[in-house]
Amino acid sequence: MTQKKLFLSIAITAAVLAFGVVMLGAYVRLSQAGLGCPDWPGCYGHVSVPSSSEVNSTLLAARPLEPARAWKEMIHRYFVGGLSTLIFALAVLAFWRRKDADQPKLLPGVLVVLLVLQALLGMWTVTLLLFPPVVTAHLLGGLATFSLLLLLVLQSGEYLKLGTGATQGMRRLAALSLAVLICQIALGGWVSSNYAAIACPDFPTCQGSLWPPDMDFASGFSWHGVGADYQGGILANSARMAIHMTHRLGAFITFLILGFTCFDIALRARDRLLRLLAGMVGALLLTQIALGISLVEFGWPLAIADLHNGVAALLLASVVTLNWAVNAKK
């Protein structure tokens, strides 16, 4: 195997693993296991989940050991460790092949920097007791890692270079769709980190109203400071409703913009692959909307909630790929 093929193989493996890490992270967060291990990077001072007799009594007094939750957290960390190894391997290979014209040089370095930032956010997630801005940033960092690894695969494999068949209008719509989707994912992270999902148990209304009059946007989107234990959330229901309804409004705007982008490209693109990409974005968009509604209708089951996060990651990946396809020229 040549070094170029080795680099591409590692990049593909890392991208797949990054998606798994995103799914595991969502599962840990949604199953209330984010503080299953109250320290970092170990668990109660150990590299695996210990028994109660092996744990310092002071740590146990601060947060009792729950093995099921602790194992969820540690398995997620093990997967992150594997992903970190692959990203460092990509950076080493990129440096080794730095004189080759076809070797991507910028993205491997950016991924290492992002990996370090993610490690810090992972630590702060635990030490700051699930502080919502940190939890949301950690989610966005994970999705950014996945997206950049996907871009690295597209770049190093020279896939989907279709830019010559796209118009400037398509490129602008694709870029706008990506920006709007990132904002909507950030809103979803804010809903999750503030435990605002169940604030509106009905759809399309919220607490029986299309736009509840007692929503508290100031508290829902303000800085509440570090130090409190945010597991389960600390906001009043009026603030959580404001967060939830903002996310619903964002979902509607995202649906309109991404839907129009898909329709425009599918209708006007000359390249069949570009039309297929637009169709894939549209299919994932409809799936995500259906999952969001199902979450409310079925009472927020964990499986659908985790799938909602996974499809969000795939939707982001498809929009990133669409942006690459309309811009990258042969």
Image (cartoon, grey):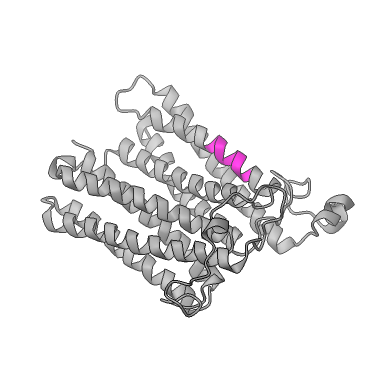
Quadrant of the image for the N terminus?
A: top left
Which of these two is toward me, 216 or 181?
A: 216
On the image, which quarter does residue 123 sit in?
top right
Count the marks.
Answer: 0
Q: Is residue 124 left or right of residue 322?
A: right
In the rendered image, the vertical position of residue 226 relative to residue 234, given as above or below: above
Q: Is residue 325 magenta?
A: no
Spot occupied by residue 115 in the image (x, y as percentages of width and height): 53, 38
Q: Is residue 119 magenta?
A: yes
Tell me the residue at 48%/27% (across/down): 92
Spot occupied by residue 281 in the image (x, y as percentages of width and height): 29, 58
In the rendered image, the vertical position of residue 6 relative to residue 189, given as above or below: above
The answer to whether one can see residue 315 in this image is yes
Quadrant of the image for the C terminus?
A: top left
Q: Is residue 82 left or right of residue 274?
A: right
Which of these two is toward me, 241 or 105?
A: 241
The answer to whether one can see residue 24 in this image is no
Tell me the residue at 13%/50% (across/down): 271
On the image, which quarter does residue 160 sit in?
top left
Spot occupied by residue 31 in the image (x, y as percentages of width and height): 62, 64
Which of these two is toward me, 305 or 75?
A: 305
User: Magenta region: which residues?
Assistant: 115-122
Tell me the residue at 16%/42% (across/down): 168
